[in-house]
Structure formats: structure tokens, C-alpha cells
Image: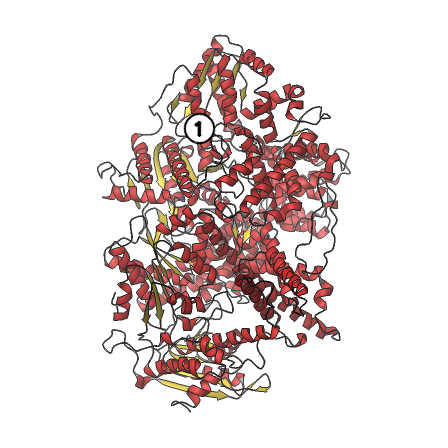
Amino acid sequence: MVGPPGSGKTGELVRSLASLLEQRVRCDRILVLVPQQAQARRFEAAVAQTCQARHLHSKPAIETIYSLAQKHVSLFFPLIAPPAGFSRSVQEPLFINIEAAQYFVDRLVQPRAEDFADLRMSRPRLARQILDNMNKAAVCGFPLEQIAERLSSAWAGEPSRLLSYQRAQDVALAFRHFCLQQGLLDFSLLMDVFGQHLLPSRSYQDYVAAHYRHVVADNLEEQPPIAHDFLRLVLRTSDSAVLVEDEPGGYRLFLGADPVSARELAAYCDQTIRSDHVFVAPPAVVSFGQALQGALSGQPISTSRGDWPAVGEGMAGLSNGASWLGSGDRPGIARYWAEMVDWVARQIERLLAADAQPADIAVLAPFVEDVLRFELQERLRSRGVGVRALRPSRPLYDHPTVRAMLALARLAHPHWQWPLTPGELARALASVMADLDAARAHLLAEAISRVGALSLPELSDSAVWQRIGERFGERYAILQRWMSGRDPAGRDPDAPLDVFWQRLFNEILTQAGFALHRDHSSAVACDKLIQGARAFRQAMERAASDHALFEAEANDIGTVPGIAPKPSVPPAVDAGLEYIVIVSQGLFGAQHPDEHVQEQESQPDTSSPNEIVLAPVYAYLTNDFRSRYQFWLEINSLGWWQRIYQPLTHPYVLSRRWQTGTRWTDADEQRAGLDMLSRIIGGLVYRCAGHVFLTSSRLGIDGQEESGPLERAAQRVIERAGK
Amino acid sequence: MKLRPQQAEIAGYRGGLLAVSAAPGSGKTHTLAALAAQLIREGVVPPDSEVLVVTFTHSAVEAIRSRIRRALAEQHLPAEGFRVLTLHSLAHQIVRERPDLAGVPTDFRIDDELSSRQAMLTAVRDFVRAEEDYWRSFLPPELAGAQRAEVEERWRETTQRIGAEVTRLAKNLRWTPAELRMRIAGNWVAAAEAGDEAPPVSPFLRIGAAIYERYERILSAGGRLDFDDLIWRAIIALNNDDDYRRRLARRWQFILEDEAQDSTPLQEEILESLVREHGNWVRVGDPNQAIMTTFTASDVRLFRDRFPRRLGVRGISLSQSGRSAQPIIDLANRLVDWATHHHPEPEVRQMALSKAARIAPVAPDDTQPNPPATESMIHAHAFDTGETEAQRIAQSAVSYILRYPDRTCGVLAPTNAFGRLIARALEEIQSRYPGRTLFEDQLRNTLRIRVVAGVLGQALRFCGQPANTAALVGLRRALQELAALDRRADQDNEETDEPPARRVEEARPAYDDGLNERRINTLLRSAKVERLLFPDPLDEPALPARVPVGADEQRAIDQLASLAAKWARASTLSPDQIALVVAHDVLRRTEDLAAAHSMALSLRRYAEANPNAQLGELADQLDDIAANRQKYLSDSLLGETSFQPTAGVITVTTMHKAKGLEWDRVYLTSVDQIEFPHQVEGAFRGEQWYLEGRDPATEARMQLRALYERSADGAAHRTPLPTERDLIRQARLEYIAERLRLLYVGVTRARRDLILTWSRERGGQPNRPALAIEALVLEGPHSH
């Protein structure tokens, strides 16, 4: 089934799954494949609902290609380890997370940092890009040795970049070698083993043929080629299959999704059904989107004033389809960022005063800054309306509670010599104790600092608690006792970081009076942190034997030419500390296909009808949200159409269909950008059940004035509508 | 828009390379705007293409933009088809659109002066720490105690200058630290092979190279680009993909460049590569006003000498100027003649001033004619000391504006220090005129900037200590100052019948409530802030029960508390975001919002560069602006409204900052032989007595340039580097030439009266007027 969002495909998919179950097909004979965990959960909920209605009791497992590969590689590891090149001594695989992979790659980059001097990037960023390339090679199925070759032949600029590509590939190969020696599987090695060794294996093919008789797969266009390879294998022998593709789609392209190889699967199907009837978006919104798309590609806009009369109230607009901030010489553009936010808040207030529910409203921007969420929250608070910020690619470090966990870990490890400032301490306490406001948190932090300890002291001074509040005194005493390590029921001073956090989480933070007692989304983030720390420690333990791999940093930089440098000593490694350092770097996970860093906040159960949605455009689309009202912010931002650029990687050149030897030109870049923007516009309008509001500010929050193609297209449409 | 014949000739331009040499006051901004509007109106600019106007400062961007808008509006045309950018924002756009080509990630960070200076301080500190013995070996060993500490401090400052100048120049020459290191080593090897006694590379250049390396490492670790990197990276991006370059060239079919005399070679290269195909490039500038060369890497020879000689370049001079009276025009032209024919240093005659840009008066029937010569005066005067000079100028200027309240008056000093001396003298006189504003101190931040910085600074400080009563009182005080200023401005507007300043749509509550401030502050001081901001039903009241509180007072306190509570909740945001929240809660005027946005941007960059900075530290930065300890770095920032002198109010500023401005009467102060030297022998600025009179930063910079020039000539490794003596001589010649241009800028600021002053004694030494003054004023027809 192919069709636009909101044309009923997923519903059809769930119904066909239910009918399989009604026919008493065994659950474990059905493969249900979706692109990402968050979607798996939503799909699961839909399946559960249908099954309940039909009194069906068993439900099939819902897989992503990652979860499936992990299961099957574990299962077949003894069989495929020797051909995959694992060292003989490796008994079982250890799957490592992005933090561990980044740590190892960073250690490999460290002595070679000068090789990348023509790039201006922090070292962790460099490590991430090397990993990114490895992941792309694995999901597309080409060898690591091809990375530099592909990038180099597509590059037309200064040759120094070619050297950087080569060096980056050298690091990738060294890391791969290290993983094979140690039996560590990062995302790329897992996918590589799955694609190159498991899929071609005869016994695995027999297993798949016997195991999966029926296939149900959603959003093929958001899945990487390796998932399509796997489906192709299953389709050869399965009894039935229903495959769904959204069009427009491909929003996970930068994470390796490949709509073209998805479409090729149609050849394995008996019939292709196009569902063109749109249930969600009204015709006026769809035609507004089409006009924008037309304006983008430079086509004449075929609309007349009759279709789009202007509306009043400080707005000019296409009465049914879209409106924009009507001011000055550039329609839709406020001078300052806050004027834009102000307009949005007033429109939302107006909609709420009419018949809209908060959950009907989505505010979308290429990037969602904290201050946007804060201002909307403050403005809507008096109406009892909340703001639900959906930011899957937000770094863990940006969660206040995660920061508090890091702060408490530093307090528990004074030998790290990483003391908290009073401000950090106050913020940590405010994030840990429920209802503690900033002012009282500071009073408490000051009282603690007066005692002057690196750890939390006992505070029995009743005058302090009289000011702060006795209930906080009780909570502090609980936390302090537990943290002191002297209480047998408290923390174990020798426990590794993840164990410390896990117990802190269970024994303190999720208890009544503490932050995570009722805050589900923060609890999810903290859980990610703990799991990450555990996986990191396990990886470090396994790798401990091979630290000789890492050379000491060459250090003669910044000395006077002609005068001998002083030698430096490499420090010892503390897994807990290293993990905290990596998390504190706050690198965002948007570019990473690893489930661990993805989609932490998108559980459907955290949404409430009393919250508006605030999301980056990509997150809104890949999570398949629908809204009655959409606000498109910062339409002049280049972020609406630009990909995330990284100098050492390339989503198109490192895709499956790319012909090595082809140059990537600026025209290609433009075409790709326009194509993606057009898909984004399509994806948004099909998900909009009522009205689109457009606005922007002349100077963005970073103080730069931008002018992108979306704004220009909107101008043309608006101009046209005005005539 | 009315245009003079020369201006009309320029506005008739329809393509090709054009060099416009524009005399002071000849209306070049006006002409550029007219040209841009004309090109758009006549459809010479293809659809989907724009006229790109590039200029030097943000204030100029605003000025040109609004003039083009106005010109288009007069023709009933929409304000589109053009783009006005500074060179830095152009470079930013080039990098921002294809960061991969520039070798940076999408979210690359930019350092402004504040954060890059911080990085340089760190680099120098680390360097001194690591190479302490070597660093100290430059100081005379016999120094001890307090004198030693003082000299060390000066040596440290000099080291910072070495680092900053070498870094800036190396970047402009496109040498990475590794490359510079290699070149220095190469010079050594070459000298050894040749068996020469070739002078080894100056230790100061080697120190500069080491600091550059450390500085780059700091920036690199944070993925940061300073302003010089931004330009460099833009060129890298353009060079790396010719298709990209061509696409931008198609987007900007016409490039109009203002202040072309200040362009650096790299900036010129960016524009050059954008016009390579269409060749539509209009460069407007005044080579005689190139006064940035010692601060930046700009090189006046590019615009003055090389560009006009290129094939196909048409030259027009915009010489007619209605600004000054004939005697002042004559003096300016004679200064040019003297410098080109009679300057005692023959080399300076070729370097300093260009005769191509002589000033001519406008036609008598011009709508803006020159002031009559009969109302003009040039006067030169010597005083015994600098102090008396400052005092007497202050008195004279005050009596002038009291007598002519409809005229403008500028006091221009060659240095900030002397300008401050005059400002202090004016402050004293001001105290005798309570109801009348006598002067405006452009050396300092404007009152509005200071008040805005004060509010943001106090708000950040409060967010860092939200339980602190003193912080809350400080916050209220800052808000009161703002309200008082707003009220005064509103009254002024009513009196003058001017339309009120543009307001942000929604009226913000006023905080100036006419209550007894002392009482409110006492109340706040005795309050429990946490109860005031975040009342808990179980708590006692926030204010002590024994003091009765009036309803108005309660309202004022509640209003403050509700704002403060919101801002305390915002304290988990990043500092720049807190500043934005605060700004939009309390600022009502567009200009204030613009200033707040720039400060927020500066905070953002500072915080990104120093992720561990506390809110208090950032508040200190803003306090420095508020208290005038630090000049608001407006030029690197946005939204600066350009300054225009007010009639009846004296402006105190520096000669550098006076560029682009004019006054009916101008005082040029300290025009002596120290500020405006004329011979290479003798004492110069920057020389350090403890280093036997050497000037390390200049030495390092000049040697780096020589190293580069030699490698560019292809003669590398064979010819020895010029001697230290030659280099210093060259540097001094350049300095002498630039100071002559500065004098020229000063002279041409005057419309009617020009008063030149100096002191007979300076720093305990006898002092003489600048040679040009002696030759042209004291011995000329105007001598007194």
C-alpha cells in the first residue's frame, strides 16, 4: 500500500494483522517490522486495541531491524563469528552503546588530532562522524574501505580534505579491528555482521523461512536498505505480506533510510494499492501545500483570489488553508524572535478561546530552543495548558534531572576532584526534590556550602529549615543519609556508577517527595542514563586488557619553536568518570541510528490532552503526529531545508545507490534540499486537519538574518493570493 | 532622491568594474543607495537575483538599508531585490549555507571580541605557565620587588599583544599554526645551510607562533571560529566548490562595496570570487580615510593603487562635497599636497595621501551648499599642559554651544585617555547647568545601553542567587532606572512633537511608580525572598508583620515578585535565553530590544566558549558595560542605531570614531608630534623600555609579513629576511602615513570651524605641534 499520511494505511495494516490472528496464525510466525522503537510502541497499542475489540489474546512481537538483528546475531553468533573475523578467544558478543563506541574512537583519534587540523570541530564531534560513516556503510552494505574512496571521488575541493577522509577511515578500520579482537559489537559491526554474514548464510535463511510465514511492515520508506534486504529474504518464502509505504516520506534519510530501495520491494508483491483518499487534511490545506511546493520548484501558481480571501485580525491569510503574521514589507516576518513568539502565543490563546483543545495544536520549528518552550509554558500556564516538548534528538545532558544525577555522582566521588559550584548544587537539589523552587534551593545550597564539604553534610540547624520548609528538611535528611555511605541501607561507596545510580533511582528519586515520583518523562531519561552507564562499564571492562592499543597523546603543541617540549603522562581510566565526561559533552543524538540515543520522549502514554505539542519538524514527521492546527515557526531559517552538515560524512554519497566516482555537485545539493523540503511540506500538510499558521523573525535567536527557500516560496504564494 | 552630476554619473552605472574615489562629505552612502534602487527599478537585476551591498559596520548596514527602502518606496516598488550585509555577515552566510565545504559542522560557533579575547588570555596564561623560565628571561635580571611585578605585568600585556597580532596576521595570510611553525623552522635551516649569519627568526615571532598554536587549540576544541576564521573559512568554502561559488555569484549579480579602503586582502578575495563571471563590482571608498590598517589586516594599497589599474576598471571621483566651508576644504587639500610633495620622509610621500581624491565645493545652487567661507574659521592654539588643554577646550566648546544652540560641536581626541580627560572637564562644567545637557560622551556607552545592560546584568545576577535580598533590591533599582529613562524619553517626545519611538505592540507594565524608594528597598531587604516569590500556604508572611505596608507598595512589591519568580523559573535556561526572556518582559523600545538582543548574542558566545561560567560571571560582563568599565562592543554586534550629533550638544569622541560624522565646529586635540610623528628616528608608541626600546608586537608582525612575502615571491630560503632595523623602519613609515590620514579625517569632519590644539609639554618633555600643522597652519595664511 502506497499513499499519503492520513489515508488509512496503518489502520488497514492493523486490521490485516488482526485478521491473521483471528485465523489462529501463531504469533511467532508473524514478522511485524517498523522503523523505530517509538513507533513500535504506538503500533503495539493500536494492535492491542484491535485485539481487545476482537477478543484476541495473543499479540506478536513488534520489531525494528535493530532489535531483530541483535536477537539473531546473538542466536547465530557461534556460527558466524569465525567468518566475520572475530578473534578466536571471543566467546559471546557484547553489544556496546554509542558512548562506549565514541570513547574508543576518541581514544584512537587523540594522537592523530593534528591530522584533522583543516577541519574546525571538537574531537567528540569528529569521533561521532567516524562512527556515523561506519553505520552508513553497514546499513547500506559496503565495506569500510570504501568510505574514503566514495567521499574522495565525490569531493572537488582542496586535496587536504582527501587526507582527512583517509585518516578518518584509518581510525574506523582500527576501531573495527579492535572490536573484532574484543568481541565488542557497536551498531555498525552488528549491522555489518547481520548483513554480510548472517543474511547470506544458508542455515539462517532456512531458519527465517521456517520461522516467518507472514509479514506486516509499516513505513518501509523510513527503513534502511538492510531492512529491505531482510524483507526480500522473507518475502521469498512467506505465505502473506502487507507492506506499507508513506508518500511523501523518507524523513529518516539522514539516519540511513532509503525510500528508493523500499519501493523496489513492490516487485515482490502481487499487487500495489494506492490509497489516495486523504481523511485528515482538508482540501484547502492540501492545496496550500501544493501551492508552496509549486512555488518551490518555480512552477506558476494556479490559484486565484477566489480560493483564498484574506482574513482579518492582524492576519492576512488564506482563510481555510493558512494564515501568517501580517506585518510590514516581508509578510510573516516579525523583527525580533520574541515578537514572533508573542504572535504565536496570542494565536494559540485565540484558538483555545474558540473551540480548540490544546492537543489540537502543534508548534513546529526546525530547532526547538528551551526558551521557546519556556515562553509558551509561561504564557499558557494561566490557562492551565501545558507544553509537551518532543525532542528526540535532545542530548540526555539537557534534562535537568539527568544533570542532577551527574551532580550527585560527583558528590559521591570526591576523589574525582570535580566540585559543584553553589549554582550547580542548587539546580541539582531543585531537580531532585519535588516542588523545591529556585529560591529555596539556593538557600539550601548556601547552607550546605557554608559547611564547606565536598559531599552532602548533615544539616540540623532548625533556622535553616524554618526558612526552607520542614518538609524539605525531611527530604534532605533522607537524601543525605543515603548519600553519606555510612548508612548500611544507603549507597555502597565502592559500587560502580551505574549501580550507584540505579539504587539512587529506585531508593530515593522515584519515592514520594522526590522528582521522579510522578515525572515519567524524566524517569525515562534517567533510566537511559543508567543503562548507558552500565553498557559503558561492561564495554570498558571487556576492553580493559587492551589499553595498550591507545598511545599517549603527542604533546608538543603550543611550545616555542626550537625549544624542547615537556613530556606528559597519560592518566588512568575511570569508567564512571569517562562516562560522565562523555554525557556532559552533550552531543545530540539526531544523527545516530542507535536506539539508545533515540526517541526517549515519544511514548504515547506521556501525552495529555491538556498539552500543546512543541516539536522540531523532523521529529513531528518521523513520529507521525497529526494536529488540527500547525504553527510553522522560523520559516526563513535555512534549517527548514538544510541537512545537518558534517565535513567528514555525507548521507547521499554514503547511500546504497551512489556510484563511486561520481562527483557530488552543488546542483545535486540544491536538488536534494528542494526535494526534501517539498517532502516536508507535503508531510506536514497531510498531517494537518485544520489550518497552518506561518511566521518567522528577521533575526533568529542566534542573531543572524536568514532567508531560505521556504520563506521565498511562501512569499510567492502570499503575493499571489493577494492579487 | 536628488543627485549631483557626479552622483548621477555613478547612479547611471549599469555594469562592469567601477572604482569610486569619494571625498569626505560627498554623499557616497546616498549615491550607493540611489544606485541600488536604480538597478532594481530598471530591472537590470535579473529575477531571483539581488544587488548585494557590502559595508563595514552594522550601523552602516541599517543606514543603507533604510535609504534603499525609501528610494524604492518613492517609486512604489516593494523593498526587495537587494541585500545589505557587513563583510562578516556575508562570510557567515557563505559558511552557513555550506558548512561542509568550509570544513565545519552545521552548528559551528562564532566568537565575538569578548569571547575571542578571553581565549587569547587563556592561551597566553597557559603559554606563560608552560614556558615560564623562557618568558622571564626577557626581563632585566636586576629588577626586584614591586618594580619587578609591575614590569612583569607590562610584559604580560605585551605578550598578549604579540599573540593577538601574530594570530590575526597569520590568519589573514592563511597560515595555520603548523604552517607557521614550519616556515619558522625552514628559515633556520635555510640560514644554516647557507652558512649565513642570517638573522634568526625573532624570538617575539616565535612566542607569537606558540601562542597562536595554543589559541587555535582552544578554539578548535570548542568548534569555534573567530571573525578572522569566518572570513578564511568563507574563502575555503568558495574555493572548494566552484559550482557553489557560481551559484552565489548568480544570486548576487551586482556587488556594491562601501568603505572599500578598509577591506582586507581576504575580504577583497571573497568579493573578487563572487564577481568573477559577471564582473559587476562597484567599489566606493576614500583612500585618504584608511585608518584601520594597524588594527586590522586591511591594506589601503589594494583599493587605492591596484584596483584602479586593473584592466577594464572605470574610475569616477566623487569629489564634490557640500560639507565644509572653503577654508577647511583648502586646508584638507593642502594637507594632501604637503604630504605628497613636502613630507620629510620621501617614502611617506608615496604612502600617505592620494591626490586623486581632492575635495571640491558643490555648485552654488545646490540644495545642500557648503557653509559660507565668511562664517568659517581655522584656529590653532598651544597650551602649557594637557590638563589645561582639556579644560580650556571644554570651556570654549561650552560657550560655543550656549551661543549657537542650533549648531553641532565635536571634540575629537587621538586617544581614549585624552578624550576622557576632556569629558571629565566637561562633567565639571555640566554640574553648573543642571537643566541642560551639554555633552554626549561617545567614548562611553550611551545611557540607554548602560541601563539595558544594567537590567540584564541584575536579572542574571538575581537568577544566580534567587534567594538573595540584595540581588532583588539591585534588580528593582535597575528596573526603576529603566522606567525613569522611558518616562523621560516619552516626555521629550511629547515636547518635541515627534512621533513616539516605535513600541513593541503590547504595552509592558511600568515599574516607575513614584513610591518612596527607600521605604520599598527597606521592605525588600527585610523580606524573605523565597516566600515573596514562591509563597507556600504553610509559610509565615514574606514581609515582617511589624511594618505596615500600603496598598500601592504592596502592588509594587507583588509586581516585582511575579517578574522575579518568572525569571527564577527561567534560571535553568542558558544565560542568553534568560536575557531574552527578561528583555521581552520589560523593554518597550525597539532600540533597547535591539541592544538586548546583541548583548544576549554576546552572552551566548561567551557562554559557549566558557561552558563553566556562572551566571554571576556573565552578570559581571554586563555590569562592566553598565558601569562603563567596558565599551559595549557594538560594532561586532547588531542593531546598533547609528549615532548622529545633536545640535547644541557637544560630542566627545575619538578621531577614529568620528569617521562618517560631521560637526559645525570641530576641536582636534593633541595634534602633536607624539600622536602624529613625521620621522622614523625617535621614540614611538609600543616600545618597551625594559626590552631596550624594542616593540615586540610590531617586530613579530612585521617579520611574519616579511616571511610571508618572501615565500610568496618564490625566493624562499635564499634571500635573507630583512633586518630587524629595516622592518621597524617600514612599520614606522606605515604608522606615520596612517596618522596623516587620521589627521585628514579629523580635519574633514568640520563644517565651519576647526580648532587645532596641543600642549607645549607632555610627560615632562617639551612637546611640539605636528609638523603638518606647523607647515600648513602656523606658517600658512591662517597662522595665529
Question: Going by the image, does A326 lie left or right of A618?
Answer: left
Q: Position of residue A510 (x, y in %)?
A: 63, 33
Q: Position of residue B651 (x, y in %)?
A: 43, 74
Question: Going by the image, does B518 lie left or right of B123?
Answer: left
Question: Going by the image, does B332 lie left or right of B567?
Answer: left
Question: Going by the image, does B360 lie left or right of B207?
Answer: left
Which of the pair A146/A671 is nearer the observer?
A: A146
Which of the pair A109/B121 is nearer the observer?
A: A109
Residue A715 occupies quadrant: top left
Residue furthest out toward the front = B194
Residue designated by label 1:
A259
Q: Position of residue B236 (x, y in %)?
A: 49, 52
Q: Is residue B259 visible?
A: no
Which of the pair A561/A360 is nearer the observer?
A: A561
Which of the pair A324/B1 is nearer the observer?
A: B1
How many residues crowd mark 1 within 10 Å: few (<14), some (14–19), many (20+)? many
Residue B686 occupies quadrant: bottom right
- Quarter of the figure that contains the C terminus of chain B: bottom left
The subunit carrying tag 1 is A
Q: Is residue A387 visible?
A: yes
As displayed, is residue B428 above or below residue A712? Answer: below
Task: Look at label 1 and name its amino acid.
Answer: Pro
As displayed, is residue A610 above or below residue B170? Answer: above
Residue furthest out toward the top = A23
Q: Position of residue B620 (x, y in %)?
A: 57, 60
Which residue: 48% across, 85% down? Answer: B771
Q: Secondary structure at mark 1?
A: helix
